[in-house]
Structure formats: C-alpha cells, structure tokens
Amino acid sequence: MNPDFKRTLVTAALPYANGPVHIGHLAGCYLPSDIYVRYLRSIGHDVKFICGSDEHGVPITIKAKNEGVSPQAVVDKYHKIMGDAFKEFGISFDIYSRTSSKIHHQTASDIFRVLYDKKVFTEQVTEQYYDETAQQFLADRYIIGTCPNCKNPNAYGDQCEKCGSTLNPLDLIDPKSTLSGNKPVLRKTKNWFLPLDKLQPKIKEYIDKHSDWRPTVYGQCKSWLNSGDGLQPRAMTRDLDWGIPVPVEGAEGKVLYVWFDAPIGYISATKELLPDTWENYWKKKDTRLIHFIGKDNIVFHCIIFPAVLMEHGEFILPDNVPANEFLNLEGDKISTSRNWAVWLHEYLLDFKGKQDVLRYTLCANAPETKDNDFTWKDFQTKNNSELVAIFGNFVNRTLVLTHKYYNGVVPDPTRYTKEDLLLLEELAAAPDKIAKAIEQFKFREALSEWMNLARIGNKYLAETEPWKLIKTNEERVKTIMNIALQITCNLAILAEPFLPFTSAKLFAMLNLPVLKWPSAKQTSNLASAHVINKDELLFSKVEDADILPQLERLANSKLHNSIPAMAAEIKPETSFDDFSKMDIRTATILEAEAVPKTDKLLKLLLDTGLDKRIVVSGIAAYYKPEEIIGQKVCLLANLAPRKIKGIESQGMILMAENAKGELSFVSPTKNETDNGSVVK
C-alpha cells in the first residue's frame, strides 16, 4: 500500500432500486470491491466500504407507474431485496444506505447550495417536451417515437434500443408521451447547468494525472475531453416530482438531477456511518478515495462528480476508478427487460450454501479488461474441476490423513529435504504475489495465484505419497503432513477476500480463529501438537440436474423474446490463395471519437502490436466511443489506405452482422491474445 495514504474510502456504485441485483452487477463492481476491502482489512489498513440504494431518477417512476404503486413503495421493496441479497452473498459493506434518507437529502441540498452561492451554475432556458394532459414536463424516458436512424417506432427520447443510437427527444419522429399517449408540445423551462465546458481545463489536468488508470477508464475520459467541441454544460436539475427538491428560489417543481445527487450518496452514507469522523474520509489529503463501478458509469464518476467536488472546494478527488467491462450471459448481453439474467436473490435460493462457488466463478471470469461471458457449464466446471478436485481434494486428504495417523494432532517436522525447502519458499512468497495483484486491481490474477497454491499442495502430496511412505518411514511422513497442514492454513488465510464463507469453515476445521494476512508470510502458522477438528467437505459437486433448470429458464426467456430471422446466403466460393493475401491481426482500440458531421463513423486509434494506426469504422450507430476503449478486435491490416471524410484509414475492423442488421465485434475469445497475433 502507498504509505502516503493513512486510510482508504471504497465506494461501490449505488444500484437503482427499481429491480433486484444480477450477476452482471456483481462482476462489475460489488465483488471486486468486496475482495479489495476484505484484503485491506486483513492487512490492518483503515478502510471503510460504502454503498446504498439509488432511489431517485426516471427508472423508479417508470417502475412505479407500470406496477401501479408509489415510487416510495418501489424503492422500499427493492432496497430490502438488494440489501438482503448483498449481505447473504457476503458483500461486506460497512453501511448500505439509501438516497431517500433525510441525511442524504440534506447533504445533497447543502452541496448544491454551496455551488449555487459560489455562482458555479449557469441558468439556461431551454425548450422541452410537455404533456398538456398530464400537465408535466417529460423526462427523456417518458417520450417515445420513431428513431430517425433505423425507423424503430418505439425509440426512447434518449436512446434507440434497437440500433443503439444516442438521441435527443427533439430527434424523434412523431413523438408521443408515455403518460397520456398524446403528442407533447414544446415549452420553455429554466434549469441550472454545470458548465463543464468552462471547467474542462481543470478536469483535463485532473485526468492527465491519472494516466495509470485502466486503459478503458483513462481512454474513455480522454475521448470525452477530445471529442467534437469537448465537454458541454449539463443540467443538474430536472422538471420532475420525484427526487430532491432544488433548494433555491424559483425552482418549484424541479428536483436535482439523479447523477448530481447519487454520487453524493457516498458522502451522506459516510456521514450516517461516522457522524463524528466522516470528514477524515472525505476531506483529508492522506485518505485514498476509490470508486468501483461498471464502464457505463465512467463519465459520471471521473468527470461530473469530480467537477462538483472541485467546485465545492473542500473534498478530496477519486484516486482511482477501477471500472470493469460488462459480463455477458451464455453468449448474449444481460438484459433485465428480456429477463436474460441470473438474479442474485434467486441464485441464493436455488444454490443454498454455494455463495463462494459463484464468487469464485465471477472472479475467475471477471471482465477486467474486456467483456466476458458467464455460462452455467463453466460454473459447473469451475466448481467440480477446481474447487472440488483441486482445493477441496487437497484439504480433505490433508485433514483426513492427519486424523488417521495422528488423531488430529499436528505432527512435529523432523528433517526438511531440498524439495521441502523449495516448496516452503513458494509458500512464503504466495501472499506477496496475491497482495500485489489485488493492490493493482488484478483480481483474476490474484485468484489464480491462490488456486496455484492449492495445486502445489496437491502435487506435493501426489509426489511424496505419505499413504504409502507411512509403512516404511514414519518420521518423513510427519514432515510431509506438517507442510501440508501449513499450506492448508495459508490457503484459509489467503482465501478470505475471495471465499469468505469457505475460509471461515476451514478455520473452524483447523480449530483456529480467523488469522490475518501478515501471518500468511509465515510458513508455520499451525504449531506442533495443535489439535485440529474433524474434516468436512468444503464443496459438493454441481450435477447436470442442478444447472438444467437454469438453462431451461434462460431458454424460455429467449423463446419468449425471440424474433424470427433469416441468415444471409453464403457468397460464391473463393480460392485459398485469395484468402491468404489478407493479413488479419488482433489489435486493441486505444482511443475512439466521432467523426464530425457524420452519424455512422468513428475514428479509432488501434494498437496492432507492430504500430499504432488510425482506422475509420462505420459503427457509430451500434457503439458509443467511450464504450469501446480497450476492446480487442480483428483488423484487416493490409487493406490499402483510403481517405474517409479527410481522414486516412489504414485498415478495416472485422464485424459480424445479424439478421436485424446489428453489428458486433469479431474479437479473440482469450484476453491473453497479444496485439499483432495473426488470425489464420
């Protein structure tokens, strides 16, 4: 840990209280943040873990309208469902608060008022759609119409979910209000804007100091700063009746923009947790602030919220924002509207006692540098072939043999061989390897190092065969079993951030209190003559019958939402010689920005492993620039350069087109594929 920081404040994105939590949320920010916090606690670092329900915004009111209940009833329901599920899954928040609380309303109002009194905001009168029947201004999601790009008749005022285009309500053809079904009219309204254009130099200076952030995060921020005319003013108030009232005169009927008030929820929750000392975690320079989020929230946590904190003047700024990519499910994007998801509260009912199996699988497949995929078959394999066959098998053999040969008493080692000493060196080095990976937010690597220690233990027992050696060399077996027990103890210590329930169970079997991380550097944590408890199975197999209902549930969701489609006909055959002329290589998108005065083109900077080159690609209707930073792609590298809109494009990205005309990347399935690898 950086010695300049005496304490760390970790936040996890506030989930919207309009539905339960699914595995995409867990993999995105809640599991990695929990692993990080548990590690910091284990090494004795001063850390606080903050989260809570985001209970304002249009999705809440839409849910309430659809269910015929009040917005408060919606947030009360889902706040409890999410909070209970997080707790049962082992997400160890110090507080799980909510933005409907009195302390949050007051905190957000106070911060807005400070910026208002400092004349940070600009007042702007703009035209917005108004429903004369419902007698209210319409938020973007309360307006539907025909998409100007793909002609989808059910596009929202902010986005077309069919073609992915970002829209403005005024772009829609034949707009209608979802409240009354009538055509809305334009009316003038006043709102308060955060002048991000004027603040851009400050924000740029801040971002430039954090070039060590994950490429996706840093690259997306740079794309926002460098695209088009740069940052633009953004309204911090909305014409709605659900939210925190704007605390200034002349703002009747307006509430704070949800992305102004939601991040302030981290502050208000800390105040609720630590009413007397909360300022130590928000205002002292020796505190490190870390936001764990998904990549769709990068702009809010890296640009808008820091801008608010800067202009307030009393708060520290985020030191790191380790945003994850998205987790897909069975090869398809997770979708709550299509019920294409694995809901946490349902998993906990269907797989009782297997919290750590899901934690292990999600961490092993964490979408840290690219979108990744969760499949039930892989879940089964991770459990049976790794947790049961490697880790569980080693622990079981070690404890069973200790009871068989020594009645559960830890034997005293006699003489170490050269091989023993080399193994003990690996055992002593493992904690630092895992710690280094965790501190660099490389949780997949850290988990792999932990499982590698279990592999080493299994290999050691397989090679020394104490069950055979006991007949001829009892003294040697004492040393072997002592070493195996020390490995077991260290596995229990090092497992706690990843598999807290399993760690606690293993410590109980070893008849030990939960040991902290520094003790893992010792290779002798179990004293000779210590008595261990009876062995219990740490994991049971996941059978085909266990995952079949999950696959059937998803199949039913897909059937319910299926759209008939026809595949394109195969083109006439070509020769191998023609194909071999194409030089297709893997590359990574470093930067992305819209090409001015076009709707379809993005200008991309690619790292090919051999060089960095510009490619212009017609994918703007399907991908936002900030979403694809860090994306691995396949590039036709030897395509003759050509100028597109005055930009020389040096190659072409390979894309797949489905029956609906939607494009998706053709990319390597393994993240370890180096840039410049030849596609054959």
Image: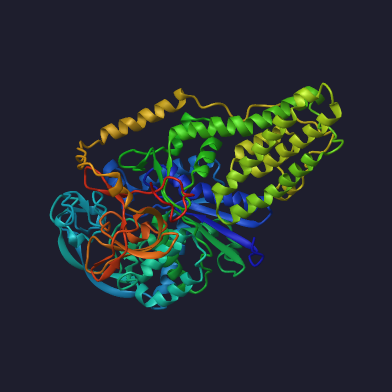
Q: Nearer the viewer, residue 18 or 273?
A: 18
The answer to whether residue 496 is visible is no
Q: Is 193 placed left or right of 98 in the picture?
A: left
The answer to whether residue 501 is visible is yes
Q: Residue 5: x and y, percent?
A: 63, 65
Residue 605 vertical placement versus 661 (above, below): below
Residue at horizontal 36%, vertical 67%? 224
Q: Quadrant of the N terminus?
A: bottom right
Q: Residue 49: x and y, percent?
A: 56, 53
Q: Residue 625: x and y, percent?
A: 34, 61
Q: Is 47 placed left or right of 486 in the picture?
A: left
| Colour scheme in use | rainbow
Q: Residue 115: x and y, percent?
A: 42, 73
Residue closest to the far front: 577
Q: Quadrant of the rendered structure where residue 641 is?
A: bottom left
Q: How many marks?
A: 0
Residue at horizontal 75%, vertical 24%? 467
Q: Is 607 placed left or right of 463 in the picture?
A: left
